[in-house]
Every structure is written in C-alpha cells, then in structure tokens.
Image (cartoon, rainbow, N blue to C red):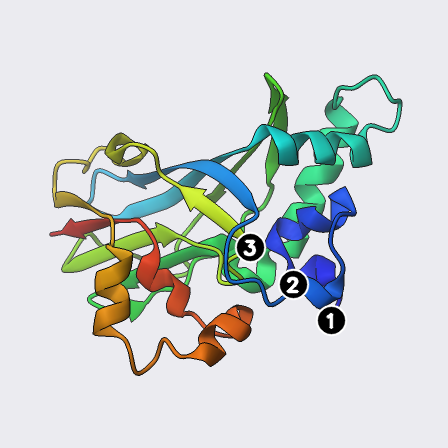
Amino acid sequence: MSYLKRSMLGLCFFAGILSPIHTAIAHPHVFAESRLEIETSENGMVVELRHVWRFDEFFSASVVLDFDEDQNLELDENELRKIGEIVRQSLAEFDYYTNVTVDGYDFAMSAPNVLNADYVDGQLLLFFAMQPKRPLELKGKISAGVYDPTLYAAMEFINDEDLIVTGASADKCKRAVIRPDADEVIAQNQTTLTEAFYEDAENNDLSKLFATRIQLTC
C-alpha cells in the first residue's frame, strides 16, 4: 500500500516531507480548522454532511511548492482541481475522516462525487459533501465527527458553531457539541488504549473517542 493511501489526505506525500517509515505517528503534524454542517430536509431526513477544512499555513505552503506547476506561488484552477481529485481518491479508505453513528452503531456515508480545493490568504481549503448510503431519518441519537485515524492530522473545530444543523428540519433535534476530555477517555478505556494503539494507530478506530463531534437527540 502506498504512503499516499496511508497518510493524512495523501498530502504529506505532496509535500515530500515524510516517507513510509513514519506511518506510526501518535501525535499530529498537520492542523486543520474544520466546519461540519448537517443538512436536513423538510420531511425530517439527513440530506448530506458538508465539510470545510482550512489547513495551517506551513502545510499549505508545502502543498503550493509541490503543485505550483507554473511557479507563480499561487494555485490556479487546474492545479487546485488536481489536488482535489488526488485527495478524494486518497481518503476513500479512511471514509474521508468522517464517522457517523446512529444509536451507537456506525452509519455508512457515500464518497463525495467531487472534492473542491481552494487557496485563500496563504491557506489550503477543501470543500466536499457526503450523502447517507441509505435513508437517514432524524430519529434517536445521531452523532457525526471528523478524525484522522492515523493521528497525523488534528482536525479542529474551534467554535461550537462550527458544528451545526441546517435545512428545513434544523430544529427537530436537540443539538450538543461533544468535546471529549483526553484524560477521561484514557481513564475509561485503559484496557483498549494500549501501547499497540499508539504504535499502530492507523489500523484501529479508537482515535474517534478523542474526536470533537456533534450529537443530535431526536
């Protein structure tokens, strides 16, 4: 398996700053400010999840160096389209860092048809939407979060307002933003958060225990 498939967005491959021996990293090297919108319909269904990721300036600059083919220190439309498509392919096996559960059970989302990229004020932005693979009714307890199972990237929601519900049924459920306390998570999961977890983070899904997420109670 290529490192492009195993690293954060495949973008560390773009920057050329890491090699395959660095896949077992247990702390973040890339930071992205995230926004997640759950779009709903008038008949009380989840229509799609809309993501916006804004990457830190250092990492964004490294991406420019790799993809700025005309060397004008900008990313034009074609260069951005190439970045978006490579990221879309690279993140497929990680479900685009998106975890959705309904009453505690995983709920599958479809891959985005397109993943858009932009470069604004020295930062790389990614935009994409994911739809439920089967009808998802606003019923029970629905949770949606974003996390990197390799722990290479920190996907941060700076404000609670960065996790919202939109659309005709936005007020149907009670909304809460869950920001887990790392010490509490470790204390409650000592039997599973073993040394093997940190040595092989990409092959487990326990990192979602630490992820900030939106929770709807309907």
Give the camera-side residue of 103 and 149: 149
Of the numbered discs 2 and 1, the one sitting upstream in the chain is 1
Q: Residue at x 32, y 63 (%)?
A: 209
Q: Amino acid at mark 1?
A: Met
Any mark on residue 6, and which? 2
How many dots with numbers?
3
Q: Earlier in the sequence, mark 1 or mark 3?
A: 1
- For image coordinates 34% across by 44% down, the residue present is 47
- Disc 3 marks a residue whose amino acid type is Tyr
Q: Is residue 16 above or below residue 171?
A: below
Where does the N terminus fall, quadrant-wise?
A: bottom right
Looking at the rendered structure, the kind of residue marked 2 is Arg
Dots 2, 1 in contact, CB < 8 A: yes
Q: Residue at x 19, y 66 (%)?
A: 103
Residue assigned mark 1: 1
Q: In the image shown, does 82 or 32 lie closer to the viewer?
A: 32
- Which image quadrant is residue 34 in? top left
Query: Where residue 109 sits in the image (x, y, percent)?
Result: 43, 58
Name which residue lies at 64% across and 65% down.
Answer: 23
What x and y, as percent, mark residue 214?
25, 47
Query: In the rendered view, does 98 fall on the left or right side of 41?
Result: right
Q: Which residue is mark 3?
A: 152
**Inter-mark Cα distance, 1 to 3:** 17 Å
Vertical arrangement, residue 206 with respect to residue 91, above or below: below
